[in-house]
Structure formats: structure tokens, C-alpha cells
Amino acid sequence: MPADKSLLHTKKLAMIERGIFTSLILAAITVAVQSLLQASPLVSIAYATDSHSVAHNMATKGAAEMQNRKYRAALPYLKQAVALDPKNANVQFLLGETYFALDQKVESIKTFNEAFRLDPACNLERPFKELGQALVVEDRAPEAIAVFTRGLTNIPANGELLCERGCTYTLLDQFQKGVSDLTEAIKAKPTYGHYYQQRAMIYHSMHQYENAIKDYTQLIKLDPQSSKAYASRANVYKAMGKLDLAAKDRAKSATLGVVDQAFSK
């Protein structure tokens, strides 16, 4: 073999040998690192801590966007936080709330359910309320009632959850249960007009007009500027045949800025 070709052949062999050597070294390093991660709890903990730290940072950024009602901006941060720390119930709750705000009800239900699986003792009102509402939107009222009931087990006498469950009962034509829940909600927060309004609507549906009038009257006492309360009471008076009182309430509602279209002249 000529000298120049022999030299070239020798160089090629050397390069191949270096490549093989490098590959062997990389393989050895990989095995060593894997062994170290398995054998050393400290290394594993350090890795996990770093992962949790990044997840915390992502969740913090997502929560900040949520505070500004920028839910679309919050979503990628929270999804990444969940991917890094899937067992963190608090992050799952934030992600569920974000899906709910974006009207992605199916994803919201899935995420809230996982959050509650991780933290069954949760005593936060909002996740129970939003999960139940999402189920109602998806025509899953019995499941929603179960969620509100579980929430009331964790947060007894919570007015909002009682109100939500009471209104959901009416979707199943269980009006008396709805009245009972709204009555308990009023006991929990007797100066909150919304509960009187919701119970009055149920009484109206049950044709218990006198009770409906009492609740709308109490609502007006609590909020004299509520045009909706006057308009709703006008409709009850109309159903009772008391057209003079109905017309008076309707006129009052109009002066406050809203004409109830459901009330016909």
C-alpha cells in the first residue's frame, strides 16, 4: 500500500477508535448518572425540589394572570405547572377554575375531579360551586347535587352552596327541597337579597304566590333600587289577578331603568 494511503488509513482507524471511545464514555456517564439517581436519595430529592420549584413559579405566574382575568394567558402556565407537579391539588384547582372561566366545562369537570381526589378535605367554596355549575351546564344535575352536598359536608351551612343545590333541585322538579335549601341559606346570611330572590322564584313556580310576594318584598326592603325585584313581584301580582298592584310595581321598575318584558300590558 502506498505511504500516503497507508497514512490515511491509519488516521481513519484512529478517528473510528476515538468515536467508539467517546460513545463508550457517554454510555458510561449515562449509566453512572442513572445509578446515582437511584442510589442517592439526596440527588433525587434535589431533582424533585427543582421540579416543584419550577411548578411553583409557573403556578404563581398563572395565578397572577387569573387575578387580572387573563385566563387564556394563565392557561399555559397552569398546564405546565400541573405537568411538573401533578399531585399538587392547589394547582389543579387553579387549572379547573381557569377552564371554567374559559367555558371549557368538560376539561373543568375533569380537572376539578382530579383536584378533589387529591384533596377530598378541601374547604374552599369556589371549586365546589364551579364544578357543580359545570355539571349543570352539561345536563348532569344529579352529579351536581352530589358535589354541592359534598361541599356542604366540608363547609357546613355555606349559603352559596345551599343556594346552588336548592336551585339545582328545581331542575329535577324537586321544588320543596329547593325551598328548604334556600331557607337554610337565608338563615346563614339573612341580609343577602339574592337568596330571597331565588326562593321567591321557586315559590312562584310552585304557585305559592303569597310566599313569593313576601320574599320579593323583603328583597325590596334590602335593596330598594332593585328594578328586577319590582318587575318580578309585578309578575306574581299579575298571576294572582291583582293587576292594579302589578301595574304599580311595573311602573316602579320602569322608573328604575328596567322594563320587564315578561309582563304584558
Image (cartoon, grey):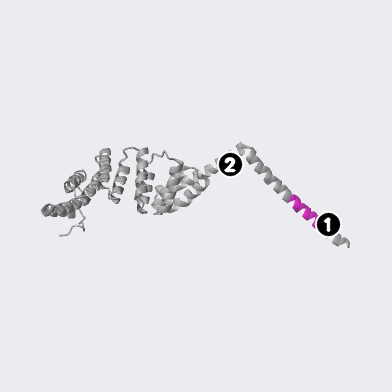
Identify which residue, 47 or 168, lies in the foreground.
168
Kind of element beneath mark 2: helix
For disc 1, the marked residue is: 10
Instruction: Point out residue 187 in the picture as x, y percentages from the top left corner.
Output: 25, 38
Quarter of the picture holding the C terminus: bottom left
Residue 52 x, y percent position in the rendering: 53, 42
Q: CA distance from mark 1 to mark 2?
A: 45 Å
- Foreground residue among 100 and 151: 151
Q: Which residue is mark 2?
A: 47
The residue shown at (35%, 42%) is 149
What residue sits 83% from the left and 57% below the top? 10
Q: Nearer the viewer, residue 202 or 23?
A: 202
- Could you tell me the amino acid type at mark 1? Thr
Q: Quadrant of the N terminus?
A: bottom right
Q: Which residues are magenta?
A: 11-22
- From the viewer's perspective, is 180 left or right of 130? left
Query: Does the magenta-highlighted stretch encompass residue 20?
Result: yes
Residue 159, position as x, y percentages in the image: 30, 41
| Pointer 2 local density, CA inside 10 Å: few below 14, some 14–19, many at least 20 | few
The number of discs equals 2
Q: Is residue 70 in sight in this rendering? A: no
